[in-house]
Amino acid sequence: MNDERVKQLFDELEGYGVRHEDPFLRNITYRATDGRFCLIDFEFATILEPDAVTAQAPEFEAAAHAADAFKADSTTLKIKWSAATDIGKYRPNNEDQFVTMAFNTEEFNYLAREGDVHIGDFDFVFAVSDGMGGEKSGEFASRFAIDNITRLLSRRFSLSTAQTRAGIHNCLEDLIHGIHRQLTQLGESYDGAKNMGATLSMVWYVQGWFYFGHIGDSRIYYLPKSGGMTQITDDHTYVGWLRRKGEINEREARYHPRKNVLAQSLGSGNQFIKPQIGELSCERGDRILICSDGVIDGLWDRGIEELLREPPESLISLNPAQRLVRAAVDESGRDNTTAVVLEIV
């Protein structure tokens, strides 16, 4: 929630004749039952004179109408998604995993690989994990990471009406740190799993916002209805650090000998991690791509955007995720390849 929206909520309060003396985000909670924001800690408040209340009433009424309009719009919006994965041309097993799920306070559903549903009062989670390690440990690590995302649900319910921006950020960070600790403990307990680890890139849709948590070199891209595609996550690699400093470009990064050396990931013997947590607002027509590095091995960023916006005739019959995976494997196929694409429609 931005500062402008915070101010608006506290200004609305004055329409009831009360001025809050601590008008900051920490005193705003979210009521999941009807999708409204609420203000708390009224020991920090002043009762206004009647004239002041009257002066604020028109502004409060307009704000209330705007909130009701947003709530009504959420019943017509849909979220559309597709997911695809491929073992590639050379790997003996697929160490990539993904999940698509929807939930609210009453139910939880795993979603099919492709579909669309009305958003209503549901939250949606989409994630990709790329495992690493000897034998089957990489496959186990990515599956472990994906399966443990369901822990998000219990934390979400414990947030109850206090589902603020800060609360969601904390929930995502706690989830990633928790998975990291458990993978590390498992790696220390079994010789064959000593260096196992996984990336994790996940998106949580809540009431018009995409919140994301990320660690490793899988990626999340944002493709707005109007404007160019942007990679919103950092590659947690030495080469990714060089790119962020502007010392190398996309082509140099692709062919760099250390491009696959991770600086941090879940497990893998990393003592400390610092996951990337963030959010962005979304509107009808916006799209998100979550993908493993197998997609990046086969496709340049420009090619990814073209396949999402204007696919060639040969791929037009495939859904967006299938297009990306097919094109990446055809071009490279050296690694497991996974893509999840979602769109607000």
Image (cartoon, grey):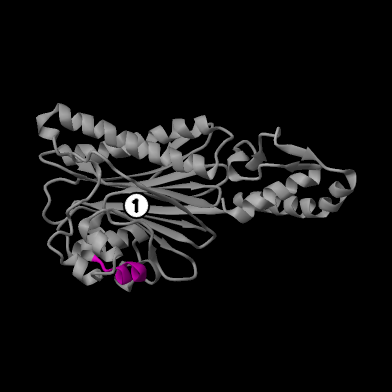
**Number of marks in the image?**
1
Q: For this rendering, which residue is in front, 252 or 17?
A: 17
Q: For this rendering, which residue is in front, 192 or 345?
A: 192
Q: Identify which residue is drawn at 66% across, 45% down.
A: 23
First to last magenta residue range: 299-307
Q: Amino acid at mark 1?
A: Ala
Above/below status of 228 relative to 53: below
Above/below status of 303 relative to 239: below
Q: Position of residue 276 (x, y in %)?
A: 36, 49
Q: Look at mark 1 in the image and give the residue it sits on.
A: 83
Main secondary-structure element of the magenta-colored stretch: helix
Q: Identify which residue is drawn at 52% across, 45% down.
A: 165
Does the rendering let one see residue 319? no
Neighbor class of circle 1 (other Cα within 10 Å; few <14, some 14-19, many 20+) is many
The part of the image, by quadrant, that contains residue 154 is top left
Does the rendering let one see residue 285? yes
Apparent side of residue 18 relative to residue 313 in the rendered image (left or right): right
Above/below status of 268 relative to 241: above
Q: Position of residue 63 (x, y in %)?
A: 73, 53
Q: Position of residue 272 (x, y in %)?
A: 27, 40
Apparent side of residue 22 relative to residue 218 in the rendered image (left or right): right
Q: Identify which residue is drawn at 68% across, 52% down.
A: 8
Callout 1 secondary element: strand
| Residue farthest to the top, as pictured | 189
Q: Identify which residue is drawn at 89% across, 48% down.
A: 51
Q: Position of residue 54 (x, y in %)?
A: 87, 49
